[in-house]
Amino acid sequence: MLSNITIGQYFPGNSPLHRLDPRTKLVVLFALIVALFLFDQPADYLVMSLLTLAAMQLSRVPLRTLVGSLKPLWWILLFTFLIHLCTTPGEEIAQVWLFSLTWEGLSHGFFICLRLVLLLLLSSLLTFTTSPLKLTDALEALLSPLKRVGVPAHELAMMMTIALRFVPTLLEETDKIMKAQQARGADFTTGSIARRLKSVVPILVPLFISAFRRADELAMAMEARCYHGGEGRTQMKQLRFVPLDYVAWAGTALLLALLAAIWLL
């Protein structure tokens, strides 16, 4: 049931997105996320949708994998759409029980769901095309100016990357535990809500024990390799910008200018 969740996975490749510097990908992703929430005209959404489709094509990540990243949130997308459809005032389409469906709610719900889909796809492209090690180096490099005010940039980058790295591991462990419990007669799909919640306990207990055991093993492995934080550490492969990064910077700047022009018109 959880095997199709692709959060945190990395797919090796040699696509243009794979060759971009991870710092460029992080900054561009942040700029696109800000643009998604700042510019809300239909033409802006069209431009962002075309850009996302082009990025998906350039990444050379299987389309099934990219679409699979949306599966964990389709219930949330449906709920969000229905909430906006039933609660947004405007010109009425139909009356369903106590709720008035409006054209404004239909439009607003569609664009909010489209925004969430684009956000998830763009974020997935980052993890699909960037290895955890490069992501750690990029986060540390971007947070390094904060070291002057006492922010532990290396430790923060390490924690975020380890958390992202262990998402697929914990999902796989959860799937194994559920199958083992089902083989022993456990039922997670029938009964009342209270009974279903009670049936989750045999999953959570071994999952927490497994997570703590993995964390302890990781800590011992890091101590055995004399890991003592980022002070004095060097990198075997230094991050360097290539011409493709400057093309990405220029393209992002032009895109933001286009979105701003459409929004102001």
Image (cartoon, rainbow, N blue to C red):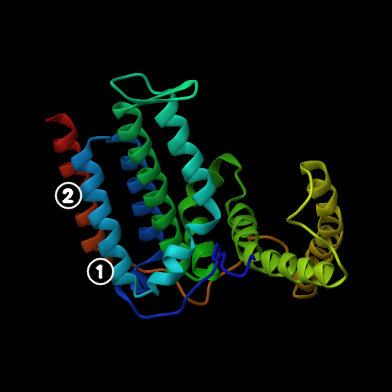
Q: Which residue appears at 85% of the width and 48% of the height?
A: 198
Give the amino acid at mark 2.
Leu
Percent of width and height locating residue 73: 52, 51
Percent of width and height locating residue 164: 60, 60
Examine the image and state in which quarter residue 40 appears: top left
Q: Nearer the viewer, residue 101 or 233?
A: 101
Q: Which residue is mark 1?
A: 244
Q: Which residue appears at 79% of the width and 49% of the height?
A: 191
SS under mark 1: helix
Crowd class of label 2 (few under 14; some 14 to 19; many from 20; radius 10 Å):
few
Q: Is residue 19 above or below residue 54?
A: below
Q: Quadrant of the C terminus?
A: top left
Crowd class of label 1 (few under 14; some 14 to 19; many from 20; radius 10 Å):
some
Examine the image and state in which quarter residue 241 appears: bottom left
> For the residues carrying marks 2 and 1, which lies nearer the camera in this image?
2
Drawn side of residue 39 relative to residue 223, left or right: left
Drawn side of residue 96 relative to residue 172, left or right: left
Examine the image and state in which quarter residue 211 appears: bottom right
Q: Which residue appears at 47% of the width and 75% of the height?
A: 11
Percent of width and height locating residue 41: 23, 35
Q: Is residue 91 above or below residue 153?
A: above
Q: Which mark is residue 254?
A: 2
Residues at discs 2 and 1 in contact (Cβ within 8 Å): no
Q: Which residue appears at 31% of the width and 19% of the height?
A: 90
The CA span between labels 2 and 1 is 15 Å
